[in-house]
Amino acid sequence: MIITKAKEDKDIEKYIGNYKRFFLIGCSECASLCGTGDDEAISIMKKWLESIEKEITGSFIAKTGCQILGTKRELSQYKEALERADCILVLSCGAGTQTITELYTEKPVIPVNDTLFIGNMSRFREFEERCRACGECFLAITGICVVTLCPKSMLNGPCGGYKEGRCEVNPERKCAWIVAYNILEKRGLLENFYQQILGPKDWSKTNSPRQYSAKRR
Amino acid sequence: MSKLREKILKGDFVITAELTPPKGPETFNLIKKLEELKNVVDAVNFTDNPSAKLFMCSMAACKLSLDVGVEPVLQMTCRDRNRIAIQSDLLGAHALGIRNLLVMSGDHTIFGDHKEAKPVYDIDSSILVKVVNNLNKGLDIKGNKLNGKTEFFFGAVVNPNAEPLIPQIKRFEQKLKMGAEFFQTQMIFDLERLKRFMDFADKFNIKIIAGVVIIRNKKMLYYLSEKIPGVVVPEWLINKIEGLDEEDIKKYGMEFAYNLIKKIMDEKICHGVHIMAFSKIKEVTELLNFSKIVKMKV
């Protein structure tokens, strides 16, 4: 899922300036799992806005905020409340925010959250990055994603910086390559892996903006 | 033509030192240091923004070194340049007369003075070895033909202190396979660890230069142990230093480096040493005079 983190109030205040009336939009997918776009997040935002003497014209939680047509359909019933608002606050990821920007070009659309990464939830609302959407998956070879979990994206084994199997960049973490090495060894793929060299990686697959049509397949 | 290559391949014991290029445009001190190192060491390595801290580029320092008459080793990391910049810089370095290279991944930007910078790591150090090997064949990394072949003598790094050691050894083998012509080790404190690694490396008939550091004071030793990636200072050495006053540590540091170098030479453990004195040239010359290593070599 896409991990989001609510901005500090003081940072939001900078963007909402003199606007008086707000419409709030959350998202029931990732942002709800992160607690940044669910009912509770909307209600906290409402209370805060009211405490600084702002008016709420309405709110709604999109089923899937990044789905443009579906969200447009859902929003049609809030036409009046949206028209009354000076500004739309979006409690979603950057993709969800831009759905709203596309639908309401005449109003300022302001993100409440910062979008962090694609994450796995290890415990309740504890997230970690394991995939960075590099467009060329090596997991069949290395078991864990060394492109993501190694801060240097080493493709062919560890650098010389680890100590007692811990990463030089973050000693609280195991060196990703020590983990991958053990996986290769357990799978009996080690000798095979070191017969060749992986890469240079095709980073052009991460050149943004990326587009993909699943229909074409 | 690399004299370093000539010497080490002939079987001579080589001594290299390390200089960090200046922190700014002023090159006076660098040139002074190089004058002092002339005829004392076989070559001087110029680091590539070590610990991800900003300094003058290694290539310019190498050129200044050539002008003084000291053979340089250009260090190149994967941290700050993509494959286009790396190849382009290497071709430029070759045009300036630089013939020795030492390539490595490079300390992460998180350690440096520009922590917000985007770390590049477009390629890793094994691939960087392959890049240089290709340039020496007149090819870029894509296999496209260049208008000539470079003549680099190129090495890679290995860390015999690494724990676990086997994944490190695999990388060593991989860099060998990619064409590395010599290796320089991370700083060594524990000769047994170096020997353990050399028992393995000797099978490959490859030249290895051991990293030796001159311990200056307690603070430095703690810094190396805690802040420098991949450096392991043995417990007994920390305890030993702990019991000495600062003046004795200086003396001990010199003796320690001397004994290490002497053992490496006497027992023919490696094919050279690389002295890391963090640009303190007086210490390097003192050590070499003290140990009469220069004379021993003759």
Image: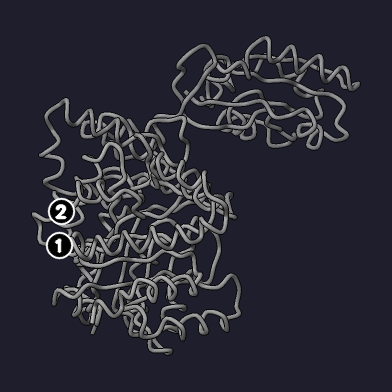
Instruction: Give left or right: position of B297 versus A176.
Output: left
Instruction: Give left or right: position of B72 versus B131.
Output: right
Q: Are marks 2 and 1 in contact (CB under 8 Å)?
A: yes
* Quarter holding residue B176: bottom left
Query: What chain does badge 2 belong to?
Result: B
Q: Which residue is mark 1?
A: B206
Establish if B28 lies above or below B129. below
> What amino acid is labelled 1 in the image?
Ile
> Which residue is pictured at 34% across the width and 66% down the height?
B274
Q: CA distance from mark 2 to mark 1?
A: 7 Å
Query: What chain does badge 1 belong to?
Result: B
Q: Secondary structure at mark 2?
A: helix
Q: Is residue B2 visible?
A: no
Q: Which residue is mark 2?
A: B201
Work out whether residue A198 or residue B218 is closer to the camera in this orientation and state it. B218
Q: Is residue B116 visible?
A: yes
Work out whether residue A76 or residue B90 is closer to the camera in this orientation and state it. B90
Establish if A174 lies above or below B284. above
> Which residue is pictured at 43% across the width and 63% down the height?
B254
> What amino acid is labelled 2 in the image?
Ala
